[in-house]
Amino acid sequence: MTEAQAILAHVEAGVLTLTFNRLHKKNAITTAMYTSLADALTEAAADSAVRAVVIQGHEQIFTAGNDLADFRNNPPSTDADKPVPVFRFLEALRTFPKPVVAAVCGPAVGIGTTLLLHCDLVYAGDNAAFSLPFVNLGLCPEAGASLLLPALVGYPRAAEKLLLGEAFYAEEAVDMGLVNRILPPHELAGYAQAQALKLAAKPPESLRITKALMKQSHAAVLPVLMKEEFRHFGELLRGPAAKEALSAVMEKRRPDFSKL
Ligand code: COA
């Protein structure tokens, strides 16, 4: 399978469906996949035939987050003004003017969870497992999560998720307001499509303005913060804690941060 096919893009009845499709690596997202996602969203934003988007994985896995080999071998530039693929994708999603529905089954790690903060409706399979293991990898949050998560769930809960980095599950995600509804995994894709089809039938300009109004409170600060997060993230990725954490993952051992 080439990396171009690792993101499937399919338009039907006004709904663009983007599917993570790199199952042998648990849908871990490579640079090429970020490019595919960014291109698809950028084109869809300008295409009047697309009126809603679904982002989904498979019934057992949404995504294992950023490809860890890419983190080691091809770390993104620390210069957020350079349009590197992951940042292009996040910007395309943050500014996407039409409704985005996410369907999450299985693990949604790192950016697999933070991207949800930019979606409009999030549905989860009862097997969904969300996690924000940035600190455990010697990194920091991205995608505006350091603002959006505390704003959504309150500081104490956001701190628990971002500082400890432990997984949390579908019921807690609903309780936190991150997820709209839980479904059996085999029903999730169909339900997300049905919701997207409802949105695709609504007047696009009303949807666009309603979405923009709801996002307005963070619209000025978010792009600045995302660049700051990105700069820290890139620097941390080149630092000793991330090197130790990524080596530990590859060597299937616990990381040792005691000397840092
Ligand atoms: N990047 C690259 N490869 C990954 C990956 C990632 N983020 N996550 C999983 N894989 C690969 C594994 O290396 C393994 O490849 P191999 O068969 O060639 O050895 C394959 O996917 C299966 O992974 P495995 O860990 O055996 O699957 P699992 O079902 O037991 O666990 C996860 C699934 C997602 C819970 C687990 O793989 C995981 O925690 N991955 C790391 C997630 C992460 O830290 N992401 C970065 C966030 S910032």
Image (tube, rainbow, N blue to C red):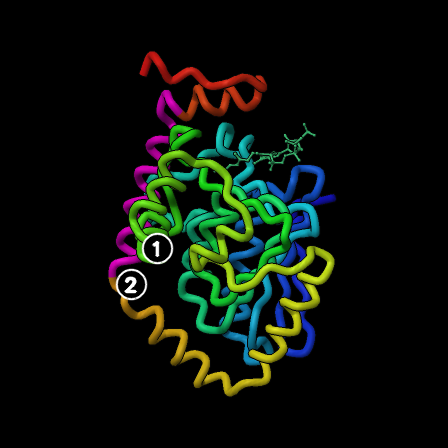
* Ligand 1's quadrant: top right
Judge left or right: residue 145 versus residue 133: left
Q: SS class of the residue under badge 1?
A: helix
Q: Quadrant of the N terminus?
A: top right
Task: Kindly identify the amino acid type of the residue bearing the numbered disc 2.
Answer: His
The reply to whether the residue tagged 2 has its Cβ within 8 angstroms of ligand 1 is no
**Residue 181 within the segment the image draws in magenta:** no
Residue 213 image label: none
Q: Which residue is mark 2?
A: 218
Q: Is residue 160 above or below residue 198?
A: above
Between 109 and 240, the one nearer to me in the picture: 109
Residue 60 visible in the snapshot:
yes
Judge left or right: residue 248 versus residue 190: left
First to last magenta residue range: 221-241
Q: Position of residue 256 (x, y in %)?
A: 42, 15
Say which quarter of the image contains residue 134.
Answer: top left
Q: Which residue is mark 1?
A: 148
Task: Kindly identify the amino acid type of the residue bearing the numbered disc 1.
Answer: Leu
Secondary structure mostly seen in the magenta stretch: helix
**Residue in the image at 53% along x and 42% along y:** 109
Q: Position of residue 90 (x, y in %)?
A: 44, 54
**Residue in the image at 50% along x and 43% along y:** 168
**Residue 226 within the segment the image draws in magenta:** yes
Q: Which badge, 2 or 1, comes first in the chain's sequence?
A: 1
The reply to whether the residue tagged 1 has its Cβ within 8 angstroms of ligand 1 is no
Between 168 and 36, the one nearer to me in the picture: 168
Q: Are marks 2 and 1 in contact (CB under 8 Å)?
A: yes
Neighbor class of circle 1 (other Cα within 10 Å; few <14, some 14-19, many 20+) is some
Q: Is residue 45 above or below residue 134?
A: below
